[in-house]
Amino acid sequence: MITDFITHANGDATTISLPEKTKKVYNILGDYPETIVNYVVPRMIRNKKNDGNIVWLTGRRAFFRFLTAGFRRRNFFSETE
C-alpha cells in the first residue's frame, strides 16, 4: 500500500530515500489505500464467516502486474522527488 510512511519517517520530519529497485516493485505491486479500501470494505461488510480471508493482491493479480509492467507505467514517487 502506497502511503507517506514509505518515504517519510517521524511525522514527515525525515525523508527516506528508496533504492530504484524498491520503487520499481512498489510501482508494480502497490496501490493507494483508497483503491484497496474500495475493494476490501464491501467484502468485509458482506462477509458472514469467522476467519474470512479477503485478499486484494492475489498471486494471479501480482503475476499479471509483473507481466504487464512494461505496458502500464505507474509512478507513485514522482510527486516526492
Image (cartoon, rainbow, N blue to C red):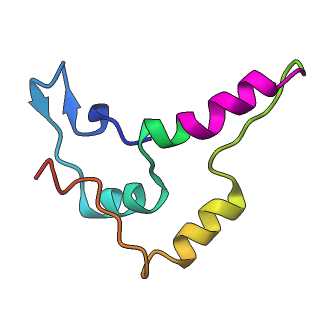
Residue 56 point in image, percent of width and height: 64, 45
Image height check: is 65 above or below 78?
Answer: below
Residue 28 point in image, percent of width and height: 44, 63
Image height check: is 22 above or below 16?
Answer: below
- Farthest-out residue, right: 49
Q: Residue at x 45, y 48 (%)?
A: 31
Q: Residue at x 29, y 61 (%)?
A: 75
The quarter holding residue 19 reads: bottom left
Residue 23 point in image, percent of width and height: 31, 57
Depth check: give the residue in front, 37 or 4: 37
Q: Residue at x 30, y 31 (%)?
A: 5
Instruction: Find out whether residue 39 is within the magenta segment.
Output: yes
Q: How many marks?
A: 0
Depth check: give the residue in front, 2 or 6: 2
Q: Residue at x 25, y 63 (%)?
A: 20
Horizontal relation, residue 9 to residue 65: left or right:
left
Instruction: Find out whether residue 8 is within the magenta segment.
Output: no
Horizontal relation, residue 56 to residue 18: left or right:
right
Depth check: give the residue in front, 16 or 11: 11
Image height check: is 66 above or below 58?
Answer: below
Query: What is the chief secondary structure element of the magenta stretch?
Result: helix
Q: Which residues are magenta?
A: 37-48
Horizontal relation, residue 60 to residue 49: left or right:
left
Image height check: is 68 above or below 30?
Answer: below
Classify the position of the N terminus by image quarter.
Answer: top left
